[in-house]
Image (cartoon, rainbow, N blue to C red):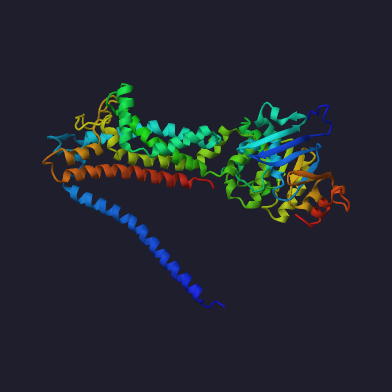
Protein backbone atom coordinates (compact mmCIF):
# COMPACT_ATOMS: atom_id res chain seq x y z
CA UNK A 1 0.00 0.00 0.00
CA UNK A 2 1.40 3.37 -1.03
CA UNK A 3 0.50 6.40 0.97
CA UNK A 4 0.87 9.75 -0.67
CA UNK A 5 2.48 12.54 1.27
CA UNK A 6 -0.55 14.77 1.53
CA UNK A 7 -2.80 12.19 3.15
CA UNK A 8 -0.81 10.48 5.86
CA UNK A 9 -2.90 8.01 7.78
CA UNK A 10 -5.93 8.49 5.59
CA UNK A 11 -7.06 5.42 3.70
CA UNK A 12 -10.21 7.10 2.57
CA UNK A 13 -10.86 10.79 2.62
CA UNK A 14 -14.28 12.24 1.89
CA UNK A 15 -14.26 15.96 1.20
CA UNK A 16 -17.45 17.97 0.84
CA UNK A 17 -19.41 15.04 -0.62
CA UNK A 18 -22.82 15.94 -1.97
CA UNK A 19 -25.28 13.53 -3.56
CA UNK A 20 -28.51 14.35 -5.36
CA UNK A 21 -31.19 11.98 -6.57
CA UNK A 22 -32.86 14.14 -9.20
CA UNK A 23 -33.87 17.33 -7.46
CA UNK A 24 -33.52 15.90 -3.96
CA UNK A 25 -30.20 16.24 -2.17
CA UNK A 26 -29.63 13.34 0.21
CA UNK A 27 -26.04 13.96 1.30
CA UNK A 28 -25.31 17.58 2.09
CA UNK A 29 -21.58 18.09 1.76
CA UNK A 30 -19.95 15.84 4.34
CA UNK A 31 -16.24 15.50 5.13
CA UNK A 32 -14.49 12.80 7.12
CA UNK A 33 -11.68 10.32 6.76
CA UNK A 34 -11.03 6.67 7.51
CA UNK A 35 -7.67 5.58 8.87
CA UNK A 36 -5.84 2.50 7.59
CA UNK A 37 -6.53 -0.72 9.48
CA UNK A 38 -9.29 0.65 11.62
CA UNK A 39 -12.88 -0.42 11.88
CA UNK A 40 -14.87 2.70 11.15
CA UNK A 41 -18.55 2.49 12.03
CA UNK A 42 -21.32 4.56 10.50
CA UNK A 43 -24.56 4.67 12.48
CA UNK A 44 -27.77 6.56 11.90
CA UNK A 45 -31.46 6.08 11.28
CA UNK A 46 -32.91 4.92 7.97
CA UNK A 47 -32.78 7.42 5.09
CA UNK A 48 -29.75 9.16 6.51
CA UNK A 49 -27.59 8.36 3.48
CA UNK A 50 -25.43 5.55 4.83
CA UNK A 51 -25.82 3.14 1.91
CA UNK A 52 -25.64 5.95 -0.66
CA UNK A 53 -22.39 7.06 0.92
CA UNK A 54 -20.86 3.59 0.47
CA UNK A 55 -22.05 3.51 -3.14
CA UNK A 56 -20.30 6.82 -3.76
CA UNK A 57 -17.03 5.30 -2.59
CA UNK A 58 -17.04 2.41 -5.09
CA UNK A 59 -18.96 4.44 -7.68
CA UNK A 60 -21.81 1.94 -8.05
CA UNK A 61 -24.00 4.99 -7.43
CA UNK A 62 -23.57 5.57 -11.17
CA UNK A 63 -25.89 2.65 -11.89
CA UNK A 64 -28.80 4.56 -10.39
CA UNK A 65 -30.32 6.91 -12.92
CA UNK A 66 -30.49 10.59 -12.11
CA UNK A 67 -27.77 10.76 -9.44
CA UNK A 68 -25.29 13.61 -9.25
CA UNK A 69 -22.22 13.47 -7.05
CA UNK A 70 -20.37 16.59 -5.90
CA UNK A 71 -17.27 16.94 -3.77
CA UNK A 72 -14.50 14.39 -3.60
CA UNK A 73 -13.87 10.87 -2.41
CA UNK A 74 -10.19 9.96 -2.22
CA UNK A 75 -8.89 6.42 -1.80
CA UNK A 76 -5.18 6.48 -0.95
CA UNK A 77 -5.20 10.11 -2.01
CA UNK A 78 -6.59 9.29 -5.44
CA UNK A 79 -9.88 10.83 -6.54
CA UNK A 80 -12.29 8.01 -7.37
CA UNK A 81 -13.79 10.09 -10.17
CA UNK A 82 -10.37 10.24 -11.84
CA UNK A 83 -9.27 6.59 -11.54
CA UNK A 84 -8.20 4.95 -14.76
CA UNK A 85 -10.24 1.79 -14.23
CA UNK A 86 -13.45 1.87 -12.26
CA UNK A 87 -13.40 -1.96 -12.16
CA UNK A 88 -9.99 -1.86 -10.49
CA UNK A 89 -11.41 0.63 -7.99
CA UNK A 90 -14.33 -1.68 -7.18
CA UNK A 91 -11.97 -4.61 -6.71
CA UNK A 92 -9.99 -2.56 -4.18
CA UNK A 93 -13.19 -1.97 -2.23
CA UNK A 94 -15.11 -5.00 -1.06
CA UNK A 95 -18.84 -4.42 -0.60
CA UNK A 96 -21.29 -6.53 1.38
CA UNK A 97 -24.94 -5.63 0.87
CA UNK A 98 -27.62 -5.75 3.62
CA UNK A 99 -29.48 -8.70 2.15
CA UNK A 100 -27.43 -11.76 1.22
CA UNK A 101 -27.16 -12.32 -2.51
CA UNK A 102 -26.01 -15.75 -3.57
CA UNK A 103 -25.43 -15.56 -7.30
CA UNK A 104 -27.19 -18.36 -9.20
CA UNK A 105 -23.91 -20.26 -9.51
CA UNK A 106 -22.20 -22.96 -7.48
CA UNK A 107 -20.62 -22.00 -4.17
CA UNK A 108 -17.21 -22.32 -5.80
CA UNK A 109 -18.19 -20.16 -8.78
CA UNK A 110 -19.74 -17.58 -6.50
CA UNK A 111 -16.40 -16.96 -4.85
CA UNK A 112 -14.44 -17.45 -8.08
CA UNK A 113 -16.60 -14.91 -9.92
CA UNK A 114 -14.59 -11.82 -9.06
CA UNK A 115 -11.11 -13.35 -9.60
CA UNK A 116 -12.26 -14.74 -12.94
CA UNK A 117 -13.72 -11.38 -13.94
CA UNK A 118 -10.29 -9.95 -13.15
CA UNK A 119 -8.59 -12.54 -15.36
CA UNK A 120 -7.40 -15.18 -12.86
CA UNK A 121 -7.71 -18.54 -14.60
CA UNK A 122 -5.34 -21.08 -13.00
CA UNK A 123 -7.21 -23.80 -11.10
CA UNK A 124 -4.60 -24.06 -8.36
CA UNK A 125 -4.63 -20.31 -7.79
CA UNK A 126 -8.42 -20.27 -7.61
CA UNK A 127 -8.67 -23.32 -5.33
CA UNK A 128 -6.34 -21.81 -2.76
CA UNK A 129 -7.96 -18.41 -2.92
CA UNK A 130 -11.45 -19.79 -2.56
CA UNK A 131 -10.58 -21.92 0.44
CA UNK A 132 -8.92 -18.95 2.12
CA UNK A 133 -11.90 -16.63 1.50
CA UNK A 134 -14.44 -19.19 2.70
CA UNK A 135 -12.36 -19.81 5.81
CA UNK A 136 -12.13 -16.09 6.51
CA UNK A 137 -15.89 -15.79 6.14
CA UNK A 138 -16.36 -18.67 8.65
CA UNK A 139 -18.16 -20.75 6.05
CA UNK A 140 -15.53 -23.27 4.91
CA UNK A 141 -16.31 -26.04 7.39
CA UNK A 142 -19.99 -26.03 6.47
CA UNK A 143 -19.57 -26.12 2.69
CA UNK A 144 -16.20 -27.72 1.97
CA UNK A 145 -17.83 -31.01 0.92
CA UNK A 146 -20.37 -29.43 -1.43
CA UNK A 147 -18.60 -26.60 -3.20
CA UNK A 148 -20.39 -27.49 -6.43
CA UNK A 149 -23.88 -27.12 -5.02
CA UNK A 150 -25.82 -23.94 -5.63
CA UNK A 151 -25.02 -20.80 -3.67
CA UNK A 152 -28.68 -19.81 -3.79
CA UNK A 153 -29.68 -22.98 -1.93
CA UNK A 154 -27.75 -22.05 1.20
CA UNK A 155 -29.56 -20.69 4.23
CA UNK A 156 -29.79 -16.93 4.71
CA UNK A 157 -26.95 -16.77 7.19
CA UNK A 158 -24.74 -18.97 5.02
CA UNK A 159 -25.49 -16.86 1.98
CA UNK A 160 -24.49 -13.75 3.88
CA UNK A 161 -21.17 -15.34 4.73
CA UNK A 162 -20.88 -16.39 1.09
CA UNK A 163 -21.39 -12.74 0.17
CA UNK A 164 -18.59 -11.81 2.55
CA UNK A 165 -16.35 -14.49 1.03
CA UNK A 166 -17.10 -13.06 -2.40
CA UNK A 167 -16.23 -9.57 -1.22
CA UNK A 168 -12.92 -10.91 0.11
CA UNK A 169 -12.18 -12.87 -3.06
CA UNK A 170 -10.85 -9.85 -4.94
CA UNK A 171 -8.51 -9.11 -2.06
CA UNK A 172 -9.80 -5.65 -1.28
CA UNK A 173 -7.92 -3.02 0.69
CA UNK A 174 -11.16 -1.67 2.12
CA UNK A 175 -14.12 -3.79 3.17
CA UNK A 176 -17.50 -2.06 3.39
CA UNK A 177 -20.18 -3.93 5.29
CA UNK A 178 -23.67 -2.51 4.93
CA UNK A 179 -25.79 -3.81 7.81
CA UNK A 180 -24.41 -7.28 7.22
CA UNK A 181 -26.15 -8.78 10.24
CA UNK A 182 -29.81 -7.95 9.63
CA UNK A 183 -30.45 -11.27 7.91
CA UNK A 184 -28.48 -13.54 10.23
CA UNK A 185 -28.73 -14.91 13.72
CA UNK A 186 -26.80 -13.54 16.71
CA UNK A 187 -24.44 -16.51 16.98
CA UNK A 188 -23.34 -16.24 13.37
CA UNK A 189 -23.11 -12.48 13.78
CA UNK A 190 -20.68 -12.93 16.65
CA UNK A 191 -18.60 -15.35 14.60
CA UNK A 192 -18.34 -12.85 11.77
CA UNK A 193 -17.53 -10.07 14.20
CA UNK A 194 -14.59 -12.14 15.42
CA UNK A 195 -13.49 -12.56 11.83
CA UNK A 196 -13.70 -8.81 11.27
CA UNK A 197 -11.43 -8.15 14.24
CA UNK A 198 -8.81 -10.35 12.59
CA UNK A 199 -9.33 -8.96 9.10
CA UNK A 200 -8.60 -5.50 10.46
CA UNK A 201 -4.91 -6.40 10.36
CA UNK A 202 -5.11 -6.91 6.60
CA UNK A 203 -7.54 -4.24 5.52
CA UNK A 204 -9.56 -1.21 6.47
CA UNK A 205 -13.16 -1.88 7.42
CA UNK A 206 -16.15 0.43 7.12
CA UNK A 207 -19.12 -0.90 9.04
CA UNK A 208 -22.55 0.56 8.42
CA UNK A 209 -24.84 -0.71 11.12
CA UNK A 210 -28.22 -0.17 12.71
CA UNK A 211 -27.00 -1.89 15.82
CA UNK A 212 -25.44 0.77 17.97
CA UNK A 213 -23.96 -1.88 20.22
CA UNK A 214 -22.24 -3.51 17.25
CA UNK A 215 -20.51 -0.23 16.45
CA UNK A 216 -19.51 0.07 20.09
CA UNK A 217 -18.10 -3.51 20.19
CA UNK A 218 -16.15 -3.42 16.96
CA UNK A 219 -15.19 0.06 15.87
CA UNK A 220 -12.39 2.30 16.99
CA UNK A 221 -14.18 5.36 15.65
CA UNK A 222 -17.84 5.95 14.89
CA UNK A 223 -19.66 8.47 12.74
CA UNK A 224 -23.26 9.43 13.42
CA UNK A 225 -25.00 10.34 10.18
CA UNK A 226 -28.45 11.89 10.21
CA UNK A 227 -30.45 13.14 7.22
CA UNK A 228 -27.34 13.40 5.08
CA UNK A 229 -25.35 15.39 7.61
CA UNK A 230 -22.63 14.31 10.02
CA UNK A 231 -23.83 14.91 13.55
CA UNK A 232 -20.60 13.75 15.07
CA UNK A 233 -17.56 11.69 14.22
CA UNK A 234 -15.08 10.76 16.92
CA UNK A 235 -13.33 7.99 18.77
CA UNK A 236 -15.67 5.43 20.33
CA UNK A 237 -14.58 6.49 23.82
CA UNK A 238 -16.16 9.86 23.10
CA UNK A 239 -19.21 8.81 21.05
CA UNK A 240 -20.29 6.22 23.58
CA UNK A 241 -19.37 8.26 26.65
CA UNK A 242 -21.71 10.27 28.82
CA UNK A 243 -20.62 13.43 27.11
CA UNK A 244 -20.36 13.28 23.32
CA UNK A 245 -20.24 16.65 21.59
CA UNK A 246 -23.84 16.47 20.46
CA UNK A 247 -26.91 15.85 22.56
CA UNK A 248 -28.41 14.04 19.53
CA UNK A 249 -25.58 11.51 19.62
CA UNK A 250 -26.13 10.83 23.30
CA UNK A 251 -29.86 10.34 22.72
CA UNK A 252 -29.35 8.10 19.70
CA UNK A 253 -26.78 5.74 21.17
CA UNK A 254 -28.88 5.41 24.28
CA UNK A 255 -31.97 4.58 22.30
CA UNK A 256 -33.87 7.72 23.28
CA UNK A 257 -34.57 8.55 19.63
CA UNK A 258 -34.02 6.85 16.31
CA UNK B 1 -62.92 -21.40 20.25
CA UNK B 2 -63.32 -22.44 16.61
CA UNK B 3 -67.03 -21.79 16.24
CA UNK B 4 -68.21 -20.68 12.83
CA UNK B 5 -69.23 -17.07 12.85
CA UNK B 6 -71.31 -15.79 9.89
CA UNK B 7 -68.17 -14.04 8.65
CA UNK B 8 -66.21 -17.29 8.51
CA UNK B 9 -69.08 -19.07 6.73
CA UNK B 10 -69.30 -16.26 4.17
CA UNK B 11 -65.55 -16.41 3.62
CA UNK B 12 -65.68 -20.16 3.02
CA UNK B 13 -68.62 -19.85 0.65
CA UNK B 14 -66.91 -17.10 -1.37
CA UNK B 15 -63.75 -19.14 -1.50
CA UNK B 16 -65.62 -22.09 -3.04
CA UNK B 17 -67.51 -19.90 -5.53
CA UNK B 18 -64.32 -18.13 -6.59
CA UNK B 19 -62.48 -21.40 -7.06
CA UNK B 20 -65.20 -22.84 -9.30
CA UNK B 21 -65.63 -19.71 -11.39
CA UNK B 22 -61.90 -19.42 -12.04
CA UNK B 23 -61.68 -23.13 -12.73
CA UNK B 24 -64.59 -23.00 -15.18
CA UNK B 25 -62.94 -20.14 -17.09
CA UNK B 26 -59.71 -22.10 -17.31
CA UNK B 27 -61.57 -25.10 -18.73
CA UNK B 28 -63.48 -22.83 -21.11
CA UNK B 29 -60.12 -21.88 -22.59
CA UNK B 30 -59.36 -25.45 -23.55
CA UNK B 31 -62.74 -26.38 -25.04
CA UNK B 32 -62.57 -24.24 -28.21
CA UNK B 33 -59.09 -25.51 -29.01
CA UNK B 34 -60.15 -29.14 -28.67
CA UNK B 35 -63.28 -28.50 -30.73
CA UNK B 36 -61.29 -26.82 -33.48
CA UNK B 37 -58.79 -29.65 -33.64
CA UNK B 38 -61.53 -32.31 -33.58
CA UNK B 39 -63.57 -30.55 -36.26
CA UNK B 40 -60.59 -30.01 -38.56
CA UNK B 41 -59.17 -33.50 -38.21
CA UNK B 42 -62.51 -35.26 -38.70
CA UNK B 43 -63.26 -33.24 -41.85
CA UNK B 44 -59.75 -33.64 -43.20
CA UNK B 45 -59.46 -37.32 -42.36
CA UNK B 46 -59.96 -38.76 -45.90
CA UNK B 47 -56.99 -36.80 -47.25
CA UNK B 48 -54.53 -36.99 -44.39
CA UNK B 49 -51.51 -39.13 -45.19
CA UNK B 50 -47.76 -38.84 -45.42
CA UNK B 51 -48.08 -38.53 -49.19
CA UNK B 52 -50.29 -35.48 -48.75
CA UNK B 53 -47.41 -33.75 -46.97
CA UNK B 54 -44.65 -34.64 -49.41
CA UNK B 55 -46.30 -34.26 -52.83
CA UNK B 56 -46.85 -31.07 -54.77
CA UNK B 57 -50.38 -29.89 -55.49
CA UNK B 58 -51.51 -31.00 -58.93
CA UNK B 59 -54.56 -30.69 -61.19
CA UNK B 60 -55.19 -27.00 -60.56
CA UNK B 61 -54.50 -27.58 -56.84
CA UNK B 62 -57.48 -29.92 -56.62
CA UNK B 63 -55.39 -33.04 -56.14
CA UNK B 64 -51.99 -33.93 -54.76
CA UNK B 65 -50.55 -32.56 -51.52
CA UNK B 66 -49.07 -29.45 -49.98
CA UNK B 67 -45.32 -30.05 -50.25
CA UNK B 68 -44.31 -26.80 -51.93
CA UNK B 69 -46.52 -24.75 -49.62
CA UNK B 70 -45.31 -26.60 -46.51
CA UNK B 71 -41.67 -26.16 -47.42
CA UNK B 72 -42.30 -22.50 -48.32
CA UNK B 73 -43.76 -21.84 -44.88
CA UNK B 74 -40.77 -23.52 -43.23
CA UNK B 75 -38.41 -21.34 -45.28
CA UNK B 76 -40.28 -18.16 -44.43
CA UNK B 77 -40.48 -18.95 -40.71
CA UNK B 78 -36.85 -19.99 -40.36
CA UNK B 79 -35.50 -17.14 -42.46
CA UNK B 80 -37.54 -14.45 -40.75
CA UNK B 81 -36.61 -15.72 -37.27
CA UNK B 82 -32.94 -15.89 -38.29
CA UNK B 83 -33.20 -12.18 -39.04
CA UNK B 84 -35.47 -10.97 -36.25
CA UNK B 85 -34.21 -13.09 -33.32
CA UNK B 86 -30.59 -11.83 -33.19
CA UNK B 87 -31.55 -8.23 -33.86
CA UNK B 88 -34.44 -8.32 -31.43
CA UNK B 89 -32.53 -10.01 -28.60
CA UNK B 90 -29.49 -7.77 -28.94
CA UNK B 91 -31.65 -4.65 -29.11
CA UNK B 92 -33.52 -5.77 -26.00
CA UNK B 93 -30.25 -6.39 -24.15
CA UNK B 94 -29.17 -2.88 -25.04
CA UNK B 95 -32.46 -1.34 -23.98
CA UNK B 96 -32.71 -3.26 -20.73
CA UNK B 97 -29.07 -3.45 -19.63
CA UNK B 98 -27.19 -0.51 -21.10
CA UNK B 99 -29.57 2.28 -22.05
CA UNK B 100 -30.18 5.01 -19.54
CA UNK B 101 -33.54 6.65 -19.30
CA UNK B 102 -33.26 9.47 -21.83
CA UNK B 103 -35.35 11.01 -24.60
CA UNK B 104 -33.49 8.77 -27.02
CA UNK B 105 -34.36 5.46 -25.34
CA UNK B 106 -37.90 6.69 -24.75
CA UNK B 107 -38.28 7.23 -28.48
CA UNK B 108 -36.93 3.74 -29.17
CA UNK B 109 -39.33 2.20 -26.67
CA UNK B 110 -42.21 4.17 -28.13
CA UNK B 111 -41.26 2.99 -31.60
CA UNK B 112 -41.16 -0.62 -30.44
CA UNK B 113 -44.60 -0.41 -28.87
CA UNK B 114 -46.11 1.29 -31.89
CA UNK B 115 -44.46 -1.05 -34.37
CA UNK B 116 -46.08 -3.94 -32.50
CA UNK B 117 -49.45 -2.35 -33.05
CA UNK B 118 -49.13 -1.86 -36.81
CA UNK B 119 -51.58 -4.10 -38.76
CA UNK B 120 -49.93 -6.81 -40.82
CA UNK B 121 -51.31 -5.50 -44.11
CA UNK B 122 -49.43 -2.25 -43.49
CA UNK B 123 -46.26 -4.24 -42.94
CA UNK B 124 -47.03 -5.90 -46.26
CA UNK B 125 -47.21 -2.59 -48.10
CA UNK B 126 -44.03 -1.42 -46.40
CA UNK B 127 -42.29 -4.64 -47.42
CA UNK B 128 -43.50 -4.23 -50.97
CA UNK B 129 -42.17 -0.69 -51.16
CA UNK B 130 -38.94 -1.12 -49.22
CA UNK B 131 -37.69 -4.60 -50.07
CA UNK B 132 -39.42 -5.69 -53.26
CA UNK B 133 -39.21 -2.39 -55.14
CA UNK B 134 -36.72 -0.04 -53.49
CA UNK B 135 -34.08 -2.60 -52.52
CA UNK B 136 -34.68 -4.44 -55.78
CA UNK B 137 -35.14 -7.86 -54.23
CA UNK B 138 -38.23 -8.51 -56.27
CA UNK B 139 -40.92 -10.81 -54.91
CA UNK B 140 -38.82 -13.42 -53.16
CA UNK B 141 -38.45 -15.49 -50.03
CA UNK B 142 -35.86 -12.96 -48.88
CA UNK B 143 -38.20 -9.98 -49.22
CA UNK B 144 -41.08 -11.85 -47.58
CA UNK B 145 -38.85 -13.02 -44.69
CA UNK B 146 -37.60 -9.50 -44.10
CA UNK B 147 -41.18 -8.24 -44.02
CA UNK B 148 -42.17 -10.94 -41.54
CA UNK B 149 -39.04 -10.19 -39.50
CA UNK B 150 -40.01 -6.54 -39.15
CA UNK B 151 -43.45 -7.64 -38.07
CA UNK B 152 -42.12 -9.96 -35.33
CA UNK B 153 -39.21 -7.78 -34.20
CA UNK B 154 -41.10 -5.56 -31.73
CA UNK B 155 -42.74 -8.55 -30.06
CA UNK B 156 -39.40 -10.30 -29.68
CA UNK B 157 -37.88 -7.14 -28.22
CA UNK B 158 -40.74 -6.81 -25.76
CA UNK B 159 -40.67 -10.45 -24.61
CA UNK B 160 -36.88 -10.47 -24.32
CA UNK B 161 -36.90 -7.28 -22.29
CA UNK B 162 -39.42 -8.84 -19.96
CA UNK B 163 -37.28 -11.97 -19.49
CA UNK B 164 -34.19 -9.85 -18.77
CA UNK B 165 -36.06 -7.68 -16.32
CA UNK B 166 -37.14 -10.81 -14.42
CA UNK B 167 -33.52 -11.39 -13.34
CA UNK B 168 -33.24 -9.68 -9.94
CA UNK B 169 -31.32 -6.39 -9.92
CA UNK B 170 -29.54 -7.57 -6.77
CA UNK B 171 -27.66 -10.13 -8.88
CA UNK B 172 -26.36 -7.39 -11.14
CA UNK B 173 -25.39 -5.20 -8.19
CA UNK B 174 -23.51 -8.08 -6.59
CA UNK B 175 -21.51 -8.48 -9.81
CA UNK B 176 -20.81 -4.77 -10.22
CA UNK B 177 -19.69 -4.56 -6.60
CA UNK B 178 -16.88 -7.04 -7.21
CA UNK B 179 -15.63 -5.16 -10.25
CA UNK B 180 -17.32 -7.05 -13.07
CA UNK B 181 -18.15 -5.03 -16.16
CA UNK B 182 -21.65 -4.81 -17.53
CA UNK B 183 -20.84 -7.30 -20.27
CA UNK B 184 -19.30 -9.81 -17.83
CA UNK B 185 -22.43 -9.49 -15.71
CA UNK B 186 -24.71 -10.00 -18.70
CA UNK B 187 -22.81 -12.97 -20.06
CA UNK B 188 -22.24 -14.82 -16.79
CA UNK B 189 -25.42 -14.05 -14.86
CA UNK B 190 -28.17 -12.26 -16.76
CA UNK B 191 -28.29 -14.23 -20.01
CA UNK B 192 -27.95 -17.74 -18.53
CA UNK B 193 -30.87 -16.98 -16.22
CA UNK B 194 -33.16 -15.43 -18.80
CA UNK B 195 -32.44 -17.64 -21.79
CA UNK B 196 -35.49 -19.84 -21.25
CA UNK B 197 -37.83 -16.88 -21.39
CA UNK B 198 -36.01 -15.37 -24.35
CA UNK B 199 -36.16 -18.56 -26.40
CA UNK B 200 -39.82 -19.10 -25.55
CA UNK B 201 -40.65 -15.63 -26.74
CA UNK B 202 -38.78 -16.19 -29.98
CA UNK B 203 -40.31 -19.59 -30.72
CA UNK B 204 -43.81 -18.34 -30.01
CA UNK B 205 -43.33 -16.04 -32.98
CA UNK B 206 -43.24 -19.13 -35.21
CA UNK B 207 -47.00 -19.47 -34.96
CA UNK B 208 -47.49 -15.84 -35.89
CA UNK B 209 -45.12 -15.99 -38.82
CA UNK B 210 -46.57 -19.24 -40.14
CA UNK B 211 -50.12 -17.99 -39.86
CA UNK B 212 -49.85 -14.57 -41.49
CA UNK B 213 -51.04 -14.26 -45.06
CA UNK B 214 -51.12 -10.53 -45.68
CA UNK B 215 -47.41 -9.67 -45.31
CA UNK B 216 -46.26 -12.37 -47.71
CA UNK B 217 -48.99 -11.92 -50.31
CA UNK B 218 -47.32 -8.91 -51.97
CA UNK B 219 -43.74 -9.74 -51.10
CA UNK B 220 -42.97 -13.31 -52.01
CA UNK B 221 -45.79 -15.84 -51.92
CA UNK B 222 -47.41 -17.16 -55.09
CA UNK B 223 -50.56 -19.11 -55.85
CA UNK B 224 -48.77 -22.06 -57.32
CA UNK B 225 -45.25 -23.31 -57.72
CA UNK B 226 -43.88 -26.72 -58.44
CA UNK B 227 -40.67 -27.83 -56.73
CA UNK B 228 -38.76 -31.12 -56.56
CA UNK B 229 -40.56 -33.36 -54.08
CA UNK B 230 -38.66 -34.48 -51.02
CA UNK B 231 -35.81 -31.99 -51.56
CA UNK B 232 -35.43 -29.80 -48.48
CA UNK B 233 -33.29 -27.31 -50.40
CA UNK B 234 -35.70 -26.92 -53.28
CA UNK B 235 -36.17 -23.17 -52.82
CA UNK B 236 -33.63 -20.45 -53.48
CA UNK B 237 -33.80 -17.27 -51.42
CA UNK B 238 -34.44 -15.25 -54.59
CA UNK B 239 -37.33 -17.56 -55.55
CA UNK B 240 -40.96 -16.93 -54.90
CA UNK B 241 -42.59 -19.65 -52.87
CA UNK B 242 -45.91 -21.07 -51.84
CA UNK B 243 -46.99 -20.89 -48.22
CA UNK B 244 -49.58 -22.84 -46.25
CA UNK B 245 -51.56 -19.82 -45.10
CA UNK B 246 -51.71 -18.39 -48.61
CA UNK B 247 -52.48 -21.83 -50.06
CA UNK B 248 -55.41 -22.25 -47.71
CA UNK B 249 -56.72 -18.84 -48.72
CA UNK B 250 -56.35 -19.68 -52.40
CA UNK B 251 -57.99 -23.08 -52.20
CA UNK B 252 -60.98 -21.80 -50.25
CA UNK B 253 -61.62 -18.68 -52.34
CA UNK B 254 -60.18 -19.18 -55.83
CA UNK B 255 -60.36 -22.88 -56.64
CA UNK B 256 -63.69 -24.31 -57.69
CA UNK B 257 -64.61 -27.97 -57.35
CA UNK B 258 -61.87 -28.72 -54.86
CA UNK B 259 -62.55 -31.77 -52.68
CA UNK B 260 -64.37 -30.78 -49.55
CA UNK B 261 -61.65 -32.20 -47.30
CA UNK B 262 -58.81 -30.28 -48.97
CA UNK B 263 -58.98 -26.93 -47.10
CA UNK B 264 -59.39 -28.81 -43.83
CA UNK B 265 -56.35 -30.92 -44.56
CA UNK B 266 -54.26 -27.82 -45.34
CA UNK B 267 -55.47 -26.26 -42.10
CA UNK B 268 -54.49 -29.39 -40.17
CA UNK B 269 -50.96 -29.26 -41.59
CA UNK B 270 -50.69 -25.55 -40.73
CA UNK B 271 -52.03 -26.12 -37.23
CA UNK B 272 -49.76 -29.12 -36.68
CA UNK B 273 -46.72 -27.09 -37.73
CA UNK B 274 -47.60 -24.34 -35.29
CA UNK B 275 -48.47 -26.71 -32.45
CA UNK B 276 -45.21 -28.57 -33.03
CA UNK B 277 -43.27 -25.32 -32.68
CA UNK B 278 -45.19 -24.43 -29.53
CA UNK B 279 -44.61 -27.86 -28.04
CA UNK B 280 -40.92 -27.47 -28.78
CA UNK B 281 -40.96 -24.13 -27.03
CA UNK B 282 -42.74 -25.52 -23.99
CA UNK B 283 -40.40 -28.48 -23.60
CA UNK B 284 -37.40 -26.20 -24.04
CA UNK B 285 -38.81 -23.97 -21.36
CA UNK B 286 -39.38 -26.88 -18.98
CA UNK B 287 -35.86 -28.15 -19.62
CA UNK B 288 -34.16 -24.78 -19.12
CA UNK B 289 -36.40 -23.93 -16.20
CA UNK B 290 -35.27 -27.11 -14.45
CA UNK B 291 -31.69 -25.88 -14.74
CA UNK B 292 -32.54 -22.44 -13.42
CA UNK B 293 -30.67 -21.71 -10.30
CA UNK B 294 -32.76 -19.64 -8.02
Residue at figure coordinates x 25%, y 30% from the top left: B241
Of A149 and A167, the residue lying toward us:
A167
Q: Residue furthest front?
A: A23
Quadrant in the rendering for residue B287: top left
Residue at figure coordinates x 18%, y 49% from the top left: B43
Of B248 and B78, the residue lying toward us:
B248
Q: Residue furthest right?
A: A243
Asked if residue B41 is positioned above or below residue A133 in the image, the reply reads below
Asked if residue B274 is positioned above or below residue A11 in the image, the reply reads below
Screen quadrant of the C terminus of chain A: bottom right
B285 left or right of B170 in image: left
Image location of residue A229, percent across then percent down: 76, 43
| Residue B144 appears in view | yes
Residue at figure coordinates x 79%, y 34% from the top left: A11
Quadrant in the rendering for residue A26: top right
B171 left or right of A215 in image: left
B88 left or right of B229 in image: right
The total of numbered circles placed on residues is 0
| Residue B48 appears in view | no
Residue at figure coordinates x 38%, y 32% from the top left: B82
Asked if residue A186 is positioned above or below residue B124 in the image, the reply reads below
B120 left or right of A68 in image: left
Of A248 and A99, the residue lying toward us:
A248
Of A197 and B111, the residue lying toward us:
B111
Image location of residue A56, percent across then percent down: 69, 37
Image location of residue A75, percent across then percent down: 75, 32
Quadrant in the rendering for residue A53: top right
Screen quadrant of the N terminus of chain A: top right
Q: Residue furthest left?
A: B257
Amino acid sequence: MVMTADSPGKKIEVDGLRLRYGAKEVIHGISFHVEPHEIFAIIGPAQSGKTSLLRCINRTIEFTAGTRVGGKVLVDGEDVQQVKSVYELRRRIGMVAPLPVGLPLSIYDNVAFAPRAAGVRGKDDLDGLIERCLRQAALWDEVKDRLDSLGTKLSGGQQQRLTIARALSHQPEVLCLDEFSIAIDPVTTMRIEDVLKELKNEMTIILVTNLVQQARRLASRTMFLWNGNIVEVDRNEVIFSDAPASKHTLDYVNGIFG
Amino acid sequence: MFTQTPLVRRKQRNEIIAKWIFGAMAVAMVVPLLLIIFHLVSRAWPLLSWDFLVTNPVGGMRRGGVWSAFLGTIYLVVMSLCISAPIGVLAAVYLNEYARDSWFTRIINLAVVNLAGVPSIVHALFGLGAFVIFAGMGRSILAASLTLAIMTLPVIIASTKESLAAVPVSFREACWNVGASRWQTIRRIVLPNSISGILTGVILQVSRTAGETAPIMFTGAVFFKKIPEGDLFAYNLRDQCMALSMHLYTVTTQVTNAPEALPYAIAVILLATVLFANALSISLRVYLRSRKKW
